[in-house]
Image: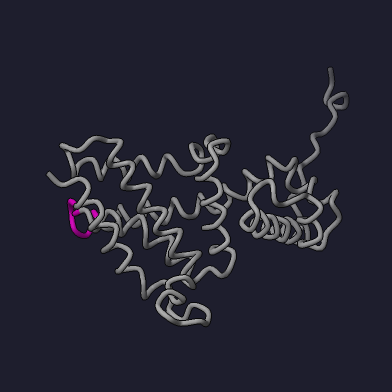
């Protein structure tokens, strides 16, 4: 076989700027609709209309609906995990062994900061995580996207409560995560219950310390002794 018999390999073209923008628009639309109605409440046609693209493009960029759903969940999970692990590593480098509050802070505050500064999509993502957490059929997605980071923090928490059952530590951690998601998505309820009939007037940053106080208190009350 000579060199002339070997067909040259075709270089894979990098996606164009327009293609990347279209994909991002589709994923953003899917994220908002999945956050609003869950997996079953959003159709591929709805996503196409929201993204202002043909349905065929939704399939091209996102694949089947299940694949698109997982892609949307995974897209921000990587960023969130990096922020949390970086916060934990940095806190340890600065302060050495961390107390309970510091561990919870490293997990909770990075999301609140992203939600406060990253726009409406990060708030939608909190609702999406809530859907994933509430439906056991998405357990494989949780295991791939969230559990590796969760395992790091649970190990830190086990060290703080060596006499407590791991399942109780996991329970307290899940309750803390639920409180975080509730703050991110339902802050208007706090304002309403406080007698303010308008939209939420306080920012996430104003509630961060209060939330971490609440979670720390719950851990200590449930697991101390």
**Where's residue 203, x and y in %?**
43, 76
Q: Is residue 98 magenta?
A: yes
As drawn, 72 above or below 2:
below
- The quarter of the picture where the C terminus appears is top left
Viewer-proximal residue among 175 and 47: 175
Which residue is pictured at 52% across the width and 79% down the height? 199
Q: Is residue 73 left or right of residue 22?
A: left
As drawn, 8 above or below 177:
above
- The quarter of the picture where the N terminus appears is top right
**Where's residue 218, x and y in %?**
25, 54
Which residue is pictured at 55% across the width and 57% down the height? 127
**Where's residue 112, x and y in %?**
42, 65
Q: Quadrant of residue 51?
A: bottom right
Which residue is pictured at 58% across the width and 35% down the height? 137
Q: Is residue 210 magenta?
A: no
As drawn, 113 above or below 82:
below
Report the magenta residues as a range: 92-99
Viewer-proximal residue among 220 and 109: 220
**Where's residue 135, x and y in %?**
55, 41
């Amino acid at each position: 076989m000579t060199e002339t018999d070997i067909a040259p390999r075709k270089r894979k073209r990098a996606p164009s700027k327009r293609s990347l923008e279209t994909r991002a628009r589709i994923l953003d639309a899917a994220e908002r609709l999945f956050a609003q109605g869950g997996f079953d409440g959003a159709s591929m046609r709805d996503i196409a209309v929201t993204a202002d693209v043909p349905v065929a493009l939704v399939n091209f960029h996102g694949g089947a609906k299940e694949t698109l759903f997982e892609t949307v969940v995974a897209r921000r999970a990587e960023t969130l995990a990096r922020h949390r692990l970086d916060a934990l590593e940095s806190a340890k480098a600065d302060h050495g062994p961390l107390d309970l509050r510091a561990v919870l802070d490293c997990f909770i505050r990075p999301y609140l900061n992203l939600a406060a500064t990253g726009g409406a999509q990060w708030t939608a993502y909190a609702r999406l995580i809530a859907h994933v957490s509430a439906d056991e059929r998405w357990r494989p997605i949780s295991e791939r996207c969230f559990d590796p980071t969760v395992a790091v923090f649970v190990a830190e928490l086990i060290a703080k409560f060596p006499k407590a059952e791991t399942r109780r530590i996991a329970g307290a951690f899940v309750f803390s995560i639920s409180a975080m998601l509730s703050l991110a998505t339902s802050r208007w309820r706090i304002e309403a219950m406080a007698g303010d009939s308008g939209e939420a007037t306080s920012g996430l940053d104003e509630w961060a310390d209060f939330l971490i106080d609440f979670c720390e208190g719950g851990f200590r009350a449930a697991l101390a002794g």
